[in-house]
Image (cartoon, grey):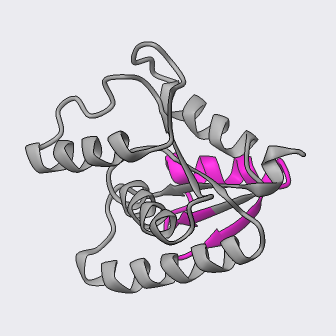
Amino acid sequence: MDERLISCCFSGHRMVAHNRLPDVRLRLRDTLAGLYGGGIRHFYAGGALGFDTLAAQEVLALRDVHADVRLCLALPCPAQSSGWKEGQTALYEYIRDRADEVICVSDRYTPDCMFARNRYMADRSCVCVCYLQRARGGTAYTVNYAARNGVKIINLA
């Protein structure tokens, strides 16, 4: 079986407005339930702050209910969380330690490693759940790349 057919990736901005978080979380939870009902079992999250973190948390919650759900953290490099605040790092490590798989796309930081990570996830997925509000930047790049490669886009913004 082609793993892409049961795989989903996430892409979103690092900043989700605090007043939007409850709505985005609820919409994400409902979307994941629908994807699970449609046969999606593998989820790729990039481990970044903001929407990536929210998505990974919701996948872990879904896995608590459905043991066949898998979370893969696709990291751009091992030092992704370097420079983050203590609370952010603690949550990142919590998620990383509970992921079913952790992949580092590059063994060190490079100017292109974030884009390489995003392409890695999109190349392995049939659907991309995103939080895209701006037509420029890393999320826009990822969503456009995924769409050009036949990945279904679900924008929660």
Residue at position x 76%, y 56% from top? 6
Residue at position x 52%, y 24% from top? 112
Q: Where residue 118 appears, x then y in whole percent? A: 59, 40
Q: Where residue 123 appears, x then y in whole percent? A: 74, 40
Q: Quadrant of residue 33?
A: bottom right
Q: Nearer the viewer, residue 150 or 102?
A: 102
Q: Is residue 130 magenta?
A: yes
Left-right relation of 24 to 39? left
Seen from this angle, which residue lies furthest top?
107
Task: Work out whether 78 lies above or below 25.
Answer: above
Left-right relation of 104 to 8? left
Task: Work out whether 108 lies above or below 41.
Answer: above
Residue at position x 45%, y 62% from top? 55
Q: Is residue 64 magenta?
A: no
Seen from this angle, which residue lies furthest left?
86
Q: Where residue 124 appears, x then y in whole percent? A: 73, 42
Left-right relation of 130 to 109? right
Q: Which residues are magenta?
A: 129-157
Q: Nearer the viewer, residue 18 or 63?
A: 63
